[in-house]
Amino acid sequence: MTADWIAVDWGTSQLRVWGMAGGRVLAAASSDDGMGRLTPEGFQPALLRLIEPWLTEGRQMPVIACGMVGARQGWAEAPYRPVPCAPVAPGLLMPVAADPRLAVRFVPGLSQRKPAADVMRGEETQIAGVLATLPNFDGIICLPGTHTKWAHLSAGEVVSFQTFLTGEMFALLAGQSVLRHSVGASGWDDAAFAEAVADALTSPARVSARLFGLRAEALLAELAPEIARARLSGLLIGAELAAARPYWLGQRVVIVAADGIAHAYAAALAAQGVQAELLPAEQMTLAGLTLAQAGDRP
Amino acid sequence: MTADWIAVDWGTSQLRVWGMAGGRVLAAASSDDGMGRLTPEGFQPALLRLIEPWLTEGRQMPVIACGMVGARQGWAEAPYRPVPCAPVAPGLLMPVAADPRLAVRFVPGLSQRKPAADVMRGEETQIAGVLATLPNFDGIICLPGTHTKWAHLSAGEVVSFQTFLTGEMFALLAGQSVLRHSVGASGWDDAAFAEAVADALTSPARVSARLFGLRAEALLAELAPEIARARLSGLLIGAELAAARPYWLGQRVVIVAADGIAHAYAAALAAQGVQAELLPAEQMTLAGLTLAQAGDRP
């Protein structure tokens, strides 16, 4: 295999790499060496463990990385670019010192001061991938995940965005709170999810009142764990949709889909009359990194 | 010391015992042997570690316990009593097998099926303590804690109640989510708390939108950790107050105060024109256990 360059998606919990020829994937590898478990000295060895077989002595390999690797707690801090701006600006990649066989550069994240402080790292690359896939896209991109992002795109720029802790809150409540006794680790119930989304959208105040009810109903009425799971997800996603209404109401919406949760967002939006388009997350990441790499070639 | 009986408050994380003469405390002790870390066989030894010095050979000591000790995962399961009912009913204490020197009985918790499933274990005893302290009390009792309870009392009975996960959610978000980097472990800011409560009450939907902002503002504008802490608490308590409005609006409210968080609830309610009375939690527990013990004497 002779890769032209290496694409890297380096998040908090995972490191994923691809050996690339232009926009084509030649090889892929991944590990659990996410930013969250590495000290600054640990990044280069973690990267080499995966890509060493793809390197050739005497040739410097371009490596383009997005994600939390550029955070303050990462390999090196890549300053945020303030919105409104294009999601990825070639020529603005940030180099870090590395093995002479490597030329590692980061895609900077985005920041927003108004209307509310917000930041992203990694999603800007997927947004660039959406723009590469759907040229001239104007509308809303929803990126579900631990920290779900909603971004408003217009004329090739991110105009504004907003982050929700929904995914992380679900994991904490389902896995570590008293609800863990009642919420299944798997399983799903579409009707329970839809009812909870609708209730949270109608009355966001009721969400905090309904959470403990999952535990109580399990104790008193043997609420099934998969129903509790879908209902918890529905309450939290419904609360998010209530707050994000200005983003999706009457808009064209693209969901960047990584897993089952993207389909839950799509179902919740469909119940509100919004038929979102789904685009695969990994492909969007690679399209965005390809764009950054191509534009950044000297 | 010759105690008549022993009062026990056995929660998820703590075991607290008092050697009593009637309603008077002769001695007190506590340990971290909460229900959460004990198997059924571990309860009696954990209790004896604290109270053995207070026992006399040949005399059976009455022990009255409230709290999670009576949960399904506790020493033995004490069935819930359904509301509406008096918070504590003498004669309904549940005995468990024990050392011949002990006559251990549990105060049963309360359950509710309508309008929403809910349960409590331990708070019913504090509510009984409030009724013992304020005879003929009609109104609302708020018991802030990991799982805050709001109870409607009328004619000596608990008519209805509702539980909120607010305290547990605060602990998870402040201690384990991405917000942990931005929310101080201590410190407070009254103005930030009041603003966040008011915002959450005005627009509960905004709460989920504002949480990640605590992290973003810390990164972009060096938000002080104590302000982030007070704001997070204010957002969560404000969301709870929005959902619990039917409980407190225009009502007489008593807060059973265990720590600083009770004062935060009092401040939040005062901003809404409700001057809550504060009663000390430990005293309410002891007054409730004393009532149960006195009424239950053969």
Image (spheres, coloured by chain):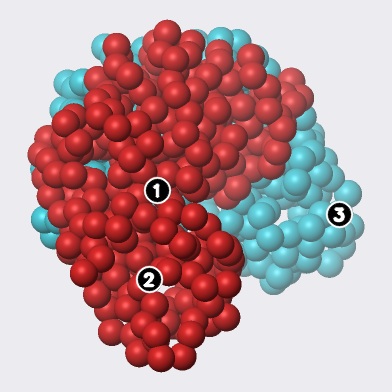
Chain colours: A cyan, B red
* Camera-nearest residue between A105 and A19: A105
Please say if B177 is above or below A83: below
Q: Are marks 1 and 3 on the same chain?
A: no
Query: Of B70 and B129, which appears nearest the observer?
Result: B129
Q: Pointer 2 and pointer 1: residues touching (CB < 8 Å)?
A: no
Q: Nearer the viewer, mark 2 or mark 3?
A: 2
The 10 Å Cα crowd at callout 2, few under 14, some 14 to 19, many 20 or more, is: many
Left or right: where A7 falls relative to A98 = left
Q: Chain of mark 3?
A: A
Label disc, if present, on residue B63 of the rendered structure: 2
Pointer 2 chain: B
- Label 2, label 3: how far apart the Cα atoms are: 68 Å
SS at circle 1: helix
Q: Is residue A226 visible?
A: no
Is B243 located above or below residue A232 in the figure? above
Please give the chain letter of the residue carrying mark 1.
B
Amino acid on which the number 2 mark rests in the picture: Val
Three-letter code for the amino acid on which mark 1 is drawn:
Ala
> Whole-percent x and y of residue B131?
31, 37
The tag on residue A98 is 3
Mark 1 to mark 3 CA distance (whole Å): 68 Å
Quick one: A23 or B32, which is closer to the camera?
B32
Query: Can residue B288 be seen in this snapshot?
Result: yes
